[in-house]
Image (cartoon, rainbow, N blue to C red):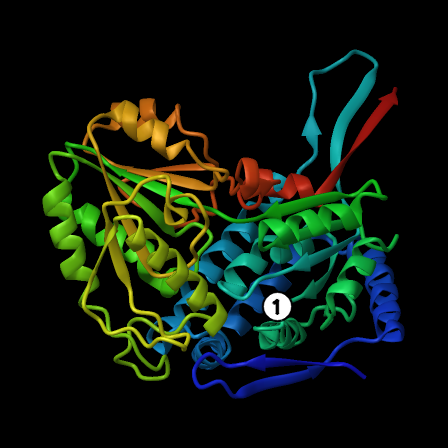
Amino acid sequence: MKRQKTISPVDGSVYVERPLAEAAEIDATLDRAMTAQKNWRQVPLGDRLVLLGRFVEAMEANADAIGVELAWQMGRPVRYGAMEIRRGFAERARYMIEIAPRALADLAVEPKQGFTRFIRREPVGVVFTIAPWNYPYLTSVNSIVPAIAAGNAVVLKHSAQTPLCAERYAEAFRAAGLPEGVFSFLHLSHEDVERVIGDSRVGFVAFTGSVAGGHAVQRAAAGRFIGTALELGGKDPAYVRHDADLAHAVENLVDGAMFNSGQSCCGIERIYVHERLYDEFVERAVKLTGEYVLGNPLDPATTLGPMVRTAAAEFVRGQIAEAVSMGAAAHVDIPDREGTPYLSPRVLTGVSHKMRVMTEETFGPVAPVMRVSSDDEAVALMNDSAYGLTAAIWTSDAGAAVEIGGRIETGTWFQNRCDYLDPALAWTGVRDSGRGCALSVLGYEQLTRPKSFHMRQ
């Protein structure tokens, strides 16, 4: 029997070890999910939503323990770990529960004499969710809660770096009284993930991960007529306009670039600052970044933990070194711990789009800052990317924010904030940031299929 091992970035030890599911277990799990879903879809929506509410409460009750587990599994400081459950997870779950009656209601069409006509949203069946390690609950809740609310069953495959997250989900659903088989999880190899995607018992795939992973999901699903939602990478830009509140911009953008050690798909990865504010912005950003405490994530004083693994940190170090060799300057005097996942945060100046740090996803605690002289220059540079997940502007002119936002190729456009998902808004991307739409009323559309009723009286 093959086993997967989770190596902790805290100290390099094996924190979790689990057997990978074998063919018989995979087959039995999909059978149970398919059978359970047929019964679950008949449960009244109100009853399904009450049960989901109990599930959220069960997750919140374990938030502190989950925070410690996250520190060991992926390195986030314990001072922030429980927030993923108590804030983002609970906010998104409860919002999707609240809007479910409206999102799943029959859609009326204009009256026609002698006929009754409407469109009903029916569940797609078994939803296969493939979740990443960086925000293991925030990314997975986007599909799991609305899928179950809509009458689907869910099979979760979580990252090998955060396998305990799948088990925590299962515990909370059991505590809430969810019927067996409506939610289940599998620890799988890459090859078995592809086989599950290709299995006729799966009706939809929700994947969050890398661009390469998204292509692999698309290939695995190519022989079937099922939907796939792909939330992939980002190289999210920010523009600090000449009329910005500078203190607010610095505070938001440093946090947006450094939180979770920069390991966020919608974190800030490149900053364009108008020349009027550039020098002062850099001075303040360097000072604020220098206040981070890099260290063991289990220490409550730590504000910046290790990256998920040493190889990830070395990749970022390589981007920084290349940029410096091409003329960039690296600021902040927090000593780096080379050869470990503990990577010092950096603000880079003197950067250009000839450098990988401005064009290739970094996924680390780095804030490259580039001077611009106009809105048009900022727009051109922001759009010069293979990605398009989020983008942000800091300005006191709401009209300018809307006008500039209309020119930016992105899934979400922010004014005076960043690195946040509002569950009332569609979460989507363009180009290599993926396809599909999670959250909001629209998020229910990909987890259901329309069925038309056309009845002559």
Please state which of residues 333 and 397 is positioned toward the viewer in this rendering: 333
Residue that appears at 69% across and 83% down: 18
Q: Quadrant of the N terminus?
A: bottom right
Instruction: Find disc 1 in the rendering and name its residue.
Output: 159
Along the horizontal axis of the image, is 143 left or right of 118?
left
Category of crowding for the residue at label 1, using alpha-carbon neighbours closer than 10 angstroms: few (below 14), some (14–19), many (at least 20): many
Please state which of residues 178 and 6 is positioned toward the viewer in this rendering: 6
**Disc count in the image?**
1
The secondary element bearing badge 1 is classed as: loop
From the top left corner, tell me how far across and down residue 341 is, in percent.
41, 74
Can see residue 47? no
Along the horizontal axis of the image, is 182 left or right of 381?
right
Residue that appears at 56% across and 41% down: 432
What is the quadrant of residue 35 in the picture?
A: bottom right
Q: Is residue 98 above or below residue 301?
A: above
Q: Residue furthest front?
A: 325
From the top left corner, tell me how far across and down residue 377 is, in percent.
28, 26
Q: Quadrant of the C terminus?
A: top right
Residue that appears at 65% across and 45% down: 229
Q: Is residue 365 above or below residue 303?
A: above
From the top left corner, tell me how far across and down residue 314 is, in percent.
43, 67
From the top left corner, tell me how far across and down residue 289 is, in percent.
21, 62
Along the horizontal axis of the image, is 200 left or right of 256?
right
What is the quadrant of residue 193 in the picture?
A: bottom right
